[in-house]
Amino acid sequence: MEEKNLLEWAKEAARQFAPTETAVEVSPYGSGHINDTFLVKGEKDCILQRMNRNIFTKPQEVMENIIGVTNFLREKIKAAGGDEMRETLTVIPPKTGGSLYWDSRGDCWRMYYRISDSVSYDRVESERDFYESAVAFGNFQQLLAEYPADTLHETIPGFHDTKARYEVFLQAVAADVCGRAKEVEEEIAFFRGRKEIACGLGDMLAAGELPLRVTHNDTKLNNIMMDPKTGKGICVIDLDTVMPGLAVHDFGDSIRFGASTADEDERDLSKVSCDLHLFQLYTEGFLEGCKGSLTETELSMLATGAKVMTYECGMRFLTDYLQGDTYFKIHREGQNLDRCRTQMKLVADMESKWTEMERIVQEIREK
Ligand code: ADP
Ligand code: GN1
Ligand code: MG
């Protein structure tokens, strides 16, 4: 008998959830690097996801976090007179109960309602959208300011511990399991030569200079659903990594992805740079969304957050390339190396524009 393909497994999984038990149209969806996402069309469209078990070793804990956070947000949205079906994710339980459906080969599946009349962008198409995404990410963090952080599971230990990631990177270079280290000596030297970038923010956290907050930790532009009519950010999605973290990391990851002038895997590096106008717009929007909740030290480290997250992400792509592309999904050979190179180009570009980046943040703070 021929092995079932992933789409067939998805169709079977869709039947386990009441709103889609008779749905016939199931199709791959979105461009996330981690989970397998499907759109299930029915009376109400739903999003079905096979969780990545290599990465999320305790999927139950991920779901506990998501249910806790979305319930908390739902109350806040209702109190503010908002639409809780559009402004936060709604987890749909499988018919068997709990929050996950486990199929016969041990994969786990979850379902959300699709956020209606919304789009997510893989690149900035209008400056206004980028500004609005910043307001929404800042607001997300502000809404969760009172969330009991100690009830959250650490779904990926040390997720933004850049120093620890540097050590893992060195181990990957030393192990060189795919024999690829020789061809990427320049890239390896780039990250080695900037080790200090990996240490600064973690040291400040340890010294109590930066507060631990409930943060999203994966604030790229396609993790927010936007309203194409109003241009507003409606709903922050991809809540797998909501954990205690640093506000400047959330800020920085959005800059890394959204303020770049090219795609994350662009091969023509002459197209890649950090757009300072987008950087300025995002900073303005994020501070508006945070509503004055950031400390002076956090504000002073925003630009640093952008450089650190870009350095870290580039190093993660390179580590994955060295380890044989086992973490981030790839759609062509060498894609993780291409992704690594765009991040390197961005870090170098930020270094050359550093005074200007700091000045932009300072001017916005003084307004
Ligand atoms: P990954 O962890 O793989 O990035 P995401 O949860 O971000 O997975 O989902 C991938 C994509 O699917 C998102 O970028 C978005 O376009 C789409 N998506 C996910 N959840 C929803 C939802 N509830 N409503 C509409 N679109 C969604
Ligand atoms: C992954 O899941 P997705 O595609 O939104 C990754 C992020 C990286 C990003 C790089 C859980 O985000 O940390 O910054 O790819 N998510 C996880 O594009 O590792
Ligand atoms: Mg995502």
Image (cartoon, grey):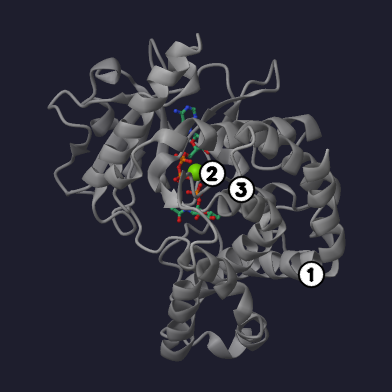
Q: Are marks 2 and 1 in contact (CB under 8 Å)?
A: no
In front: label 3 or label 1:
3
Disc 2 target residue: 31
Disc 1 target residue: 351
- Res. 49 image quadrant: top left
**236 relative to 84, above or below:** below
What type is the residue that disc 2 sits on?
A: Ser
26 on left or right of 180? left
In front: label 2 or label 3:
3
Instruction: Look at the numbered disc 2 and say if its residue's Cβ is closer than 8 Å to ligand 1.
Output: yes
207 on left or right of 282? left
Q: Position of residue 284 (x, y in %)?
A: 75, 38
What type is the residue that disc 3 sits on?
A: Thr
Q: Residue at x 64, y 58 (%)?
A: 305
Q: Which mark is residue 295?
A: 3
**Residue 20 visible, this angle:** yes
Q: How many marks?
A: 3
As measured in the structure, the alpha-carbon distance from the residue carrying label 3 to the one carrying label 1 is 24 Å
- Res. 43 image quadrant: top left
Q: Earlier in the sequence, mark 3 or mark 1?
A: 3
Q: Earlier in the sequence, mark 2 or mark 1?
A: 2
Dot 1: what SS? Answer: helix
Foreground of the two, 67 or 8: 67
What type is the residue that disc 1 sits on?
A: Glu
Dot 2: what SS? Answer: loop
Q: Position of residue 19 (x, y in %)?
A: 29, 16
Q: Position of residue 48 (x, y in %)?
A: 36, 32
In front: label 2 or label 1:
1
